[in-house]
Image (spheres, rainbow, N blue to C red):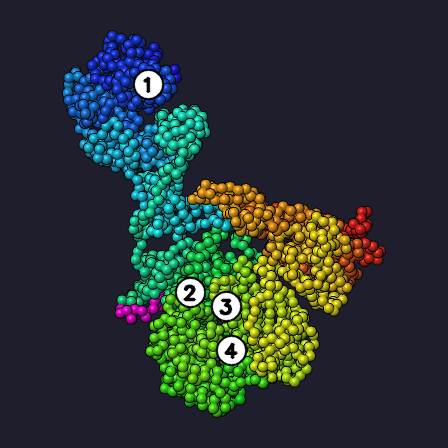
């Protein structure tokens, strides 16, 4: 009806419907005819007769057209008989009406059969059946798909071709055929490819087909265009009628192409009643004149044969790789470019789409050519150029491949050919598998990194902490392509560069995102455009025009819809079993019926009902698989990628390679990944290339040459040409040719100056690239390389400095949050920093290689960077920090060596300025013996350059001067003395002038560690005259034997050898009556093979000297130095044999402890000599070979110095009396034997110590670890030892002149302060040890051996001991914080005095000791045996030490013992970053000591502390029978016992604190968790003690102090059960399937039957398993009873706050009930590094199912608790926390109900208040309370006593200021309002993804109040308060109101409020 209305309204003329179902509806032409409109098509009768499949076949049979056997075979009636209306009875004979009839008909025809619905089409109502069962299965389906349609059966043709004849019939009865078309390429009986003319059948048969078609059309009076379809049976060589389509089909352009006609125009002319013989196009077809009018018969007149062949391809939205299943969805792009040979059309365009109810065809292409082959080629080319991108699939690639297949090219196809290809799973051409893998991996990595980056930035923008596991550089994935799984790893090499690896083969690829969402892929030097589209079954990847599917892992238990559609019917009942491959349902997709096959056998459970609309990926059904193990899995790929080149073709020029290498190095520093070795090797190679500057110049010159002024280019080219000519010379000349950078800069500068003034700026800008290159290379290649290295290293330092623990930031997430706040508007910068930091390990590899390769040869210019590296404190950067520290030491030692060398040479090489030494020389480590000018300042300047744009400004570590580092300590006086002493001569060294003599003596006594420098000068044989070597030898001997040398070394030369001998006192017995003189000798050799010869010379010298002195040379010390030379390590034949055997050599093969210099020497890749370990082996062999000679010489110790790359290597060997052999002594590697004795290294014999030198090498540190047991953490002990060579301060000299022994002793101790501070700084500096372990030691012992002798003999030992003790205690108190920070437990000093030595021992086990009682003074005396030196107390002790007999009578050299149990507990608590519970009384003592000292320093009255201890603590323990927390009769008893003897994880004290406000002492009850006892957990016994102590505090009305450090309630499994439990799995081979039960074996159950409840279960193998159902445990307090205890103490603590005074110090992590107590007590002091949490963040993350929280601090740190009002104060450590508690208590009465204590003050109560806001200035409440600096008077006083105000909860409720203060000494509470606008920051909630940080401005308030906590405030006090307050605001605007509160406090305490309005 609509068509009729439209045609009448708009056309009123003939209309033609050539396509669609309406064109086949007979009612249409009848209705049009009735309206007077002519229909361009057949009349209704013909349409009705031929439009029906059954009717047309009946008529065809009547017309004699061959047909296939079918249900209507033999049924015929001509059109003339029926006039188009076939009688119903005849029609019904050909139809099937029931299932039985269908079976009978099929059996009669013979299978296979096609059952069809006559009204069907497009795949609907058509089924192929092969048996009766299939007929029964599909018959109802056919009926349901086309309801009401007649059904018929037709024999399925064998291999056949689908051929068509195009007919044209006019209204005059003329019918013409326009040749044939071949439509044999079909899927599901629908055409895909058409071509014409047909060539599959003989021409005669084709002509016969045309004849029959014309006859059929003529017989029914057909008018218009029609298509008669035949099946050509290939084997039988016959054809059969199929059907007639009474319309123009979409493939009609094929016919038009081969006949050069326009069929639609012909139809229009037919509608105009023009006969065929008059139509020009038809006349041309029959070779007639197109313009002629003569008649011809279309049946008999021959036609012009086609001169072309046409091939057509339908473009459909079907997935050719999945059985041509239809797809629907969005279309993003359609690209088709027609050519003269190919044209086509598309029904959609980019931005459109195809819905699930439309036809799948959306395009049609037609290609023509002179031959079939040419047409095929043209079509293939066209298809390759077609690009359709979007959600849909297309058959374009498949069709192109199919056209090129041999079957199609050779025309060996049939109607089932395409279906057979589909069944055989023939795929279209895919991209090469490796490109698919590489492209997919790169794209996924790119998208994943972009997604993660966006996610990361989202976190930052919302103020949330990003999860720590977001990786932005490393990715891995499994890609399934064609059932092969490729495991790929992708590493980002830059923002767009990726490294894809498969099975250890890798390739680099560049992937850049395009504007249309695709990617430009560069791999192997080629470019590809790649697009991806997500689908239900995976990701479709389209590379150029080829595509493939990256499939998801198949899950056969989930049956999902692959594309949108409708579930038509379920063929299997829900819950029924289906077999693999069985059809379980049918869906309608794009007018096609698609069967759904089951991928595996099992039971099906449908999730959607019949008729439901399906979306892509929607779940249709679930499967309970019969056997999941039989499911086909993708096969793992085990091959490798093919060899591929770089992604881009790079130039091989040096400058281009350098740019790439430098960019790669920078990318590594930016956090990306490149092969470090290759990049560094390439970088070094390019930097070493002499042509690099010139090529870089040419690169820039080519860009600016054309814009240069005339003549300038010629000048520049002349200079560079000369340089280029020099480079073209010989290799030797080329290496020494320097780029003329300075000359070029001069020319450029001159050209700019010569230009007109108005053009200078522009010219300078144009020449800036050239000037930059010239300037970069103006100082030579070394300086340019140095600048490049510094640029790269600065990037590392600039990033990692931002990730070091500082300002309370302990976790990496907190540091990132701090960066977020530092870059509020540039979160991308934060992300870049994070990416860089994530690549730390890779960056460190590059940095370490650079340090070893490029910095090691000359570290001096890099000192500024090295200091920054050495300051890195994190554990992750420990190794780089160590390397930097070592290089810094090397550079400074090289400077020191140069200073020493010049001093001994007699030249004045020191510049004196302001009395300080300024070393002007340095040394190149690569050529360490050739001093060079220092480059420290230049290196610092170069390192201070700007970082890359990513880093912004860099953080520069404040540089300590070299003198400050202590390397040159004591060398300032290296200058000639005024007095001239006579020359002294030697046999080899010539005259030693007075100036040199003075410098030698200075070097001997200087604190600077010059031993290594002197040793290197000794082994340096480059001095031909041996003068410097001689002086270095003499100085070395004097220094190491200082001050025990008895005579000058006697040096003699014997050929190439130097030999020296001397006498010395044994350092240990030198001051005793048992002193023993000994002989020392030094032998300098050029080779170790001369050792035996040299020993003979030395033996004679030792014997001569010993006989002269009358001593026995037994136990003498021999020093051997082997000079550097080519044969220095050549050994004798005997030693060579020892080395060859490989046997033990004096026990040195297991030694691995080297100094830092040796470590870096051995790790350096360019070490020119043997490694330290190799040198040790050679030396040990030589010493062992010479053992007989050494033994005959009575040598007790042998020390051998051998030249190495940087500094000499020392090895020591000691004679072992028991084994009668020399043994390697590890401790003699770092120091000589006399020094080792002074350092008393014998005491370390029991320790497995690792040596580390100090930064200035003055102190020797030995580290070892101890464990209480295997489960306990390792405790790190450090022994720091050093010699003090000088005592010469003015105070000490004055004391010496006064001859007052006590003053001398006190001054000597005071002079050790600088050494002590240096040691403490060394211990606390953030530097790793040689094992790369950062962090400080747990326990440190410092030992200082003072060498200058003190005149303390024959004096009052009591006075001396008192002076020593007093001075030492004062020094420790002064540096108490440093002692505690460094972990110093013992500080020991040894002072030499005539007749012996004094020793001082300061014990600081807690770190809070500072009194004289902790200082022990001893003297060294000989024991009764006359040999052993023991500790002895002075004869008169002034103050009795804490443990006077601790060491008395013990040997001085007794080895150090393991730490006692108490100390191990103390250190274990320190490992938890808290204070050991028994050390808190000491903390209170230290805090009180500080409070009294601060009061005295402020000049307050009553500032002298009372005598004795300031804290008296009595431990409280539970006694009596009742010790359960439920008991109401808990009894506490004071006990006196040592610390650490508790067996409960809770300790309580009754403390008396002598505070300034309560000098007589105020009492408190203190409770502390013992973190070392089961992690401080709360159990029933702990709860009982806590409750008893709390009740005692309430009973005695005392404050209750809780010191919290715990792990919450102790709930767990009994240990004895946990250790025996075994697990039974559901599948022993696959534990992932779950746990079956937990059980005990028979034997374990018999032992633990009282601890568990279990049920016996016997396995199939006969094993007896006792399945555990309940765990009871032998130990009480592991179950839910702890929760009851927690409730009890929680109730008690809440009551204590309500009725008394409670305060909590969170000293350690506080968990669970501990956190509740901290909150219930209300008053809370929290440390910055300790959280208050109810449960751990890991547990919360598990509950939330994602990584939400990253640390405990994020849950309960001070930023959470402090800013939310839980914590009143936030402190840095426990000492500060205790100080806060004491200050808080000072405002409170000593006992509840008592008056608050008055604290006298020097701030008078009647003074005026100085602060007043100026005009237009808002009131500052804090200034009003405390006063402020400023004004004419300098200090404007506030309302309250000076320094008495303490603000509470400063971070919470910031519009209100609260705290406590004193007014005239009276404690008051202060509440004030903030008048300024404040910003309240509400942090984001990590648990809510959409939560964001908010900044809320809060306006200021008005009003101010004071609370006077006083029970009976007198009128005079009120007046004093009013007077003081009235002067606050003298302007008179404000009124003062004093009123008494009507209410009352607890204990009837009155409250007074002072309001200022």
Between marks 3 and 1 in the image, the one whose residue lies nearer the viewer: 3
Alpha carbon distance from label 3 to label 1: 95 Å
- The quadrant holding residue 1500 is bottom right
Between marks 4 and 3 in the image, the one whose residue lies nearer the viewer: 3
Label 1 CA crowd tier, 10 Å (few <14, some 14–19, many 20+) = many
Q: Is 1645 left or right of 1437, judged from the image as shown?
A: left
The residue located at (28%, 38%) in the rendering is: 429
Mark 3 or 2 closer to N-term? 2
Between marks 4 and 1 in the image, the one whose residue lies nearer the viewer: 4
Is 1171 drawn above or below residue 671 in the view shown? Answer: below
Read off the magenta span.
Answer: 729-748
Which disc number belongs to residue 117?
1
Q: Would you say the residues marked 2 and 4 are in contact, meaning their CB atoms lie under 8 Å apart? A: no
Q: Is residue 1203 on the magenta stretch?
A: no
Residue 1574 seen from this side:
yes
Residue under label 2: 851
Q: Position of residue 505 (x, y in %)?
A: 33, 51
Residue under label 4: 1235
Q: Is residue 732 on the magenta stretch?
A: yes
Which disc number belongs to residue 1248?
3
The residue located at (40%, 86%) in the rendering is: 1097
Mark 4 or 1 closer to N-term? 1
Label 3 CA crowd tier, 10 Å (few <14, some 14–19, many 20+) = few
Alpha carbon distance from label 2 to label 4: 33 Å
- Label 3: element kind: loop
Residue 1632 seen from this side:
no
Mark 4 or 3 closer to N-term? 4
């Amino acid at each position: 009806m609509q068509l009729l209305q439209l045609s009448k309204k708009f056309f009123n003329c003939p209309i033609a419907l050539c396509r669609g179902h309406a064109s086949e509806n007979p009612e249409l032409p009848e209705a049009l005819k009735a309206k007077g409109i002519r229909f361009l098509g057949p009349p209704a009768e013909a349409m009705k007769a031929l439009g029906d499949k059954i009717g047309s076949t009946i008529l065809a049979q009547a017309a004699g057209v061959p047909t296939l056997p079918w249900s209507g075979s033999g049924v015929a009636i001509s059109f003339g008989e029926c006039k188009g209306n076939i009688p119903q009875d005849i029609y019904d004979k050909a139809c099937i009406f029931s299932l039985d009839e269908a079976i009978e008909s099929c059996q009669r025809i013979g299978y296979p059969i096609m059952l069809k619905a006559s009204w069907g089409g497009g795949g609907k109502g058509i089924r192929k059946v092969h048996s009766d069962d299939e007929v029964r299965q599909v018959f109802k389906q056919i009926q349901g798909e086309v309801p009401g349609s007649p059904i018929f059966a037709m024999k399925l043709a064998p291999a056949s071709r689908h051929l068509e004849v195009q007919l044209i019939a006019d209204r005059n009865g003329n019918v013409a055929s326009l040749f044939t078309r071949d439509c044999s390429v079909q899927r599901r009986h629908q055409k895909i490819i058409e071509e014409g003319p047909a060539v599959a059948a003989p021409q005669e048969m084709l002509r016969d087909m045309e004849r029959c078609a014309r006859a059929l059309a003529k017989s029914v009076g057909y008018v218009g265009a029609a298509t008669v379809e035949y099946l050509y049976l290939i084997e039988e060589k016959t054809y059969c009628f199929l059907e007639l389509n009474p319309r123009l089909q979409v493939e009609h352009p094929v016919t038009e192409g081969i006949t050069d006609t326009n069929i639609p125009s012909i139809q229009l002319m037919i509608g105009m009643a023009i006969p065929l013989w008059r139509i020009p196009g038809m006349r041309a077809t029959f070779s007639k004149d197109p313009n002629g009018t003569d008649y011809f018969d279309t049946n008999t007149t021959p036609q012009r044969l086609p001169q072309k062949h046409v091939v057509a391809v339908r473009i459909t939205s079907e997935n050719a790789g999945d059985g041509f299943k239809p797809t629907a969805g969005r279309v993003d792009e359609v690209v088709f470019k027609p050519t003269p040979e190919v044209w086509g059309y598309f029904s959609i365009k980019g931005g459109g789409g195809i819905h699930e109810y439309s036809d799948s065809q959306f395009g049609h292409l037609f290609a023509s050519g002179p031959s079939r082959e040419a047409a095929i080629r043209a079509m293939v080319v066209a298809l390759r150029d077609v690009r359709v991108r979007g959600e849909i699939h297309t058959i374009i690639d498949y069709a192109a491949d199919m056209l090129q297949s041999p079957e199609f090219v050779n025309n060996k196809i049939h109607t089932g050919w395409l279906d057979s290809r589909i069944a055989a799973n023939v795929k279209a051409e895919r991209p090469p598998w490796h490109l698919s893998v590489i492209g997919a991996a790169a794209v996924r990595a790119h998208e994943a990194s972009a997604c993660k980056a966006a996610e990361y930035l989202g976190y930052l923008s919302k103020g949330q902490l990003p999860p720590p596991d977001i990786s932005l550089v490393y990715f891995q994935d499994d890609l399934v392509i064609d059932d092969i799984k490729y495991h790929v790893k992708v590493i980002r090499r830059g923002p767009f560069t990726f490294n894809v690896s498969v099975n250890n083969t890798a390739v680099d690829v560049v992937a850049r995102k395009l504007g249309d969402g695709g990617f430009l892929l560069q791999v192997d030097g080629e470019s590809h455009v790649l697009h991806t589209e997500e689908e239900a079954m995976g990701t479709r990847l389209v590379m150029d025009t080829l595509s493939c599917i990256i499939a998801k892992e198949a899950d056969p238990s989930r049956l999902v819809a692959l594309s949108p559609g409708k579930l038509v019917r379920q063929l299997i009942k829900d819950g029924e079993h289906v077999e693999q491959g069985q059809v379980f349902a049918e869906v309608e997709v794009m007018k096609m019926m698609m069967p759904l096959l089951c991928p595996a056998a099992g039971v099906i459970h449908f999730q959607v009902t019949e008729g439901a609309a399906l979306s892509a990926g929607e779940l249709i059904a679930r499967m309970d698989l019969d056997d999941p193990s039989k499911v086909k899995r993708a096969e793992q790929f085990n091959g490798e990628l093919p060899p591929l080149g770089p992604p881009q073709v790079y130039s091989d020029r040096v400058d281009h390679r350098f740019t790439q290498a430098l960019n790669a190095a920078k990318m590594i520093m930016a956090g990306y990944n490149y092969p470090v070795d290759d990049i560094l090797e390439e970088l070094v190679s390019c930097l070493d290339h002499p042509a690099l500057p010139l090529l870089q110049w040419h690169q820039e010159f080519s860009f600016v040459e054309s814009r240069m002024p005339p003549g300038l280019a010629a000048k520049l080219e002349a200079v560079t040409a000369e340089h280029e000519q020099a480079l073209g010379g010989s290799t030797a000349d080329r290496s020494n040719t320097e780029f003329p950078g300075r000359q070029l800069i001069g020319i450029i500068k001159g050209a700019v100056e010569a230009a007109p003034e108005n053009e200078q700026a522009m010219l300078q800008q144009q020449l800036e690239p050239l000037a930059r290159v010239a300037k970069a290379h103006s100082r030579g290649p070394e300086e340019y390389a140095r600048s490049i290295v510094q640029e790269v290293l600065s990037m590392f330092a600039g990033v990692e400095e931002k990730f070091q623990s500082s300002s309370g930031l302990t976790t990496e997430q907190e540091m990132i949050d701090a960066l977020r706040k530092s870059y509020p508007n540039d979160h991308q910068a934060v992300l870049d920093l994070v990416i860089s930091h994530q690549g730390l390990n890779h960056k460190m590899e590059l940095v370490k290689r650079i340090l070893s390769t490029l910095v090691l040869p000359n570290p001096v210019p890099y000192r500024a960077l090295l200091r920054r590296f050495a300051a890195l404190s994190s554990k992750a950067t420990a190794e780089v920090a160590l390397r930097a520290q070592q290089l810094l030491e090397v550079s400074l030692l090289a400077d020191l060596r140069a200073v020493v060398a010049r001093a001994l040479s007699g030249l004045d090489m020191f510049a004196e300025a302001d009395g300080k030494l300024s070393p002007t020389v340095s040394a190149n480590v690569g050529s360490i013996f050739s001093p060079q000018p220092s480059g420290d300042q230049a290196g610092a300047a170069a390192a201070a350059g700007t970082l890359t744009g990513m880093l912004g400004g860099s953080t520069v570590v404040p540089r300590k001067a070299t003198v400050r580092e202590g390397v040159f300590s004591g060398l300032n006086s290296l200058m000639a003395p005024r007095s001239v002493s006579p020359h002294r001569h030697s046999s080899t060294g010539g005259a030693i002038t007075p100036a040199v003599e003075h410098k030698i003596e200075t070097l001997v006594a200087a604190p600077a560690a010059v031993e290594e420098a002197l040793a290197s000068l000794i082994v340096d044989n480059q001095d031909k005259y041996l003068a410097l070597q001689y002086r270095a030898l003499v100085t070395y001997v004097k220094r190491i034997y200082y001050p025990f040398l008895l005579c000058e070394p006697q040096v003699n030369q014997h050929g190439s050898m130097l030999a020296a001998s001397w006498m010395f006192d044994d350092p240990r017995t030198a001051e005793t009556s048992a002193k023993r003189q000994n002989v020392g000798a030094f032998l300098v050799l050029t080779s170790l093979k001369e050792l035996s010869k040299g020993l003979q010379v030395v033996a004679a010298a030792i014997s001569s000297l010993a006989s002269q002195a009358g001593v026995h040379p037994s136990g003498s010390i021999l020093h051997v130095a082997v000079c550097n030379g080519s044969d220095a390590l050549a050994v004798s034949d005997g030693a060579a044999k020892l080395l060859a055997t490989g046997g033990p050599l004096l026990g040195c093969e297991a030694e691995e402890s080297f100094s830092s210099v040796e470590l870096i020497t051995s790790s350096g890749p360019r070490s020119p000599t043997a490694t330290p370990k190799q040198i040790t082996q050679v030396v040990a062999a030589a010493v062992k070979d010479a053992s007989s000679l050494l033994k005959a010489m009575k040598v007790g110790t042998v020390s051998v110095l051998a030249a190495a790359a940087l500094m000499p290597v020392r090895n020591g060997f000691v004679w072992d009396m028991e084994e009668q052999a020399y043994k390697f002594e590890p401790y003699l590697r770092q120091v000589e034997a006399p020094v080792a004795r002074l350092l008393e290294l014998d005491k370390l014999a029991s320790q497995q110590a690792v040596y580390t030198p100090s930064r200035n090498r003055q102190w020797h540190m030995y580290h070892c670890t101890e464990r209480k047991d295997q489960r306990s953490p390792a405790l790190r002990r450090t022994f720091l030892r050093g010699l003090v060579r000088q005592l010469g301060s003015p105070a000490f000299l004055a004391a010496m002149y006064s001859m007052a022994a006590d003053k001398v002793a006190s001054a000597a101790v005071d002079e050790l302060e600088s050494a002590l501070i240096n040691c403490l700084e060394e211990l606390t500096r953030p530097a790793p040890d040689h094992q790369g372990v950062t962090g400080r030691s747990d326990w440190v012992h410092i030992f200082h051996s003072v060498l200058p002798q003190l005149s303390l003999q024959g004096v009052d030992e009591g006075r001396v001991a008192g002076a020593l003790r007093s001075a030492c205690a004062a020094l420790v108190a002064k540096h108490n914080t440093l002692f505690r920070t460094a972990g110093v437990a013992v500080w020991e000093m040894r002072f030499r005095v005539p007749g012996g030595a004094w020793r001082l021992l300061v014990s600081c086990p807690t770190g809070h000791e500072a009194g004289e009682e902790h200082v022990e003074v001893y003297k060294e005396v000989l024991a009764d045996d006359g040999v052993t030196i023991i500790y002895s107390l002075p004869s008169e002790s002034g103050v009795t030490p804490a443990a006077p007999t601790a060491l008395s009578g013990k040997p001085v050299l007794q080895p150090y013992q393991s730490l006692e149990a108490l100390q191990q507990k103390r250190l274990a608590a320190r490992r938890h970053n808290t204070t050991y519970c028994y050390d808190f009384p000491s903390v209170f003592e230290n805090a009180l000591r500080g409070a009294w000292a601060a009061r005295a320093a402020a000049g307050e009255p009553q500032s002298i502390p009372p005598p004795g201890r300031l804290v008296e603590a009595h431990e409280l323990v539970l006694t009596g029978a009742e010790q359960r927390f439920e008991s109401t009769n808990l009894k506490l008893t004071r006990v006196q016992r040592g610390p650490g003897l508790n067996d409960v994880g809770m300790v309580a004290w009754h403390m008396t604190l002598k505070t300034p406000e309560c000098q007589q002492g105020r009492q408190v009850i203190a409770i502390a968790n013992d973190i070392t006892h089961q992690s401080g957990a709360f159990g029933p016994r702990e709860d009982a003690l806590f409750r008893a102590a709390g009740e005692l505090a309430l009973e005695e009305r005392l404050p209750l102090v809780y010191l919290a450090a715990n792990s919450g309630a102790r709930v767990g499994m009994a240990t004895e059960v946990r250790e025996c439990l075994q697990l039974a799995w559901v599948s022993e081979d696959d534990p992932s399937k779950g746990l079956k039960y937990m059980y005990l074996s028979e034997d374990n159950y018999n032992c633990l039957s009282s601890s568990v409840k279990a049920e016996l279960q016997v396995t199939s193998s006969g094993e007896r398993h006792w399945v555990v159902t309940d765990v009871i445990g032998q130990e009480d307090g592991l179950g839910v009873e702890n929760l009851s205890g927690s409730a009890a103490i929680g109730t008690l603590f809440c009551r204590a706050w309500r009725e008394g005074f409670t305060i909590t110090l969170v000293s350690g992590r506080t968990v669970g009930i501990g956190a509740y107590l901290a909150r219930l007590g209300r008053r809370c002091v929290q440390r910055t590094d300790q959280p208050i949490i109810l449960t751990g963040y890991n547990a919360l993350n598990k509950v939330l199912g994602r990584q939400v929280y990253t640390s405990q601090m994020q849950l309960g740190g001070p930023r959470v608790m402090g800013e939310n009002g839980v914590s009143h104060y936030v402190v840095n450590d426990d000492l500060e926390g205790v100080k806060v508690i004491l200050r808080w208590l000072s405002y409170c009465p000593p006992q509840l109900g008592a008056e608050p204590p008055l604290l006298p003050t020097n701030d008078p109560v009647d003074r005026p208040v100085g602060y007043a806001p100026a005009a237009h200035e808002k009131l500052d409440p804090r200034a009003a309370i405390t006063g402020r600096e400023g004004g004419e008077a300098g200090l404007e006083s506030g309302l309250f006593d000076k320094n008495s105000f303490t603000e509470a909860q400063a971070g919470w409720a910031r519009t209100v200021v609260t705290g406590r203060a004193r007014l005239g000494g009276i404690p008051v509470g202060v509440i004030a309002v903030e008048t300024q606008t404040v910003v309240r920051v509400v942090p984001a909630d990590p648990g809510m993804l959409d939560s964001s940080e908010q900044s809320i401005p809060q306006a200021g308030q008005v009003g101010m109040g004071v609370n006077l906590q006083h029970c009976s405030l007198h009128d005079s006090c009120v007046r004093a308060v009013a007077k003081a307050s009235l002067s606050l605001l003298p302007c008179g605007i404000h009124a003062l109101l004093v009123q008494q509160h009507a209410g009352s406090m607890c204990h009837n305490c009155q409250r007074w409020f002072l309001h200022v309005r």
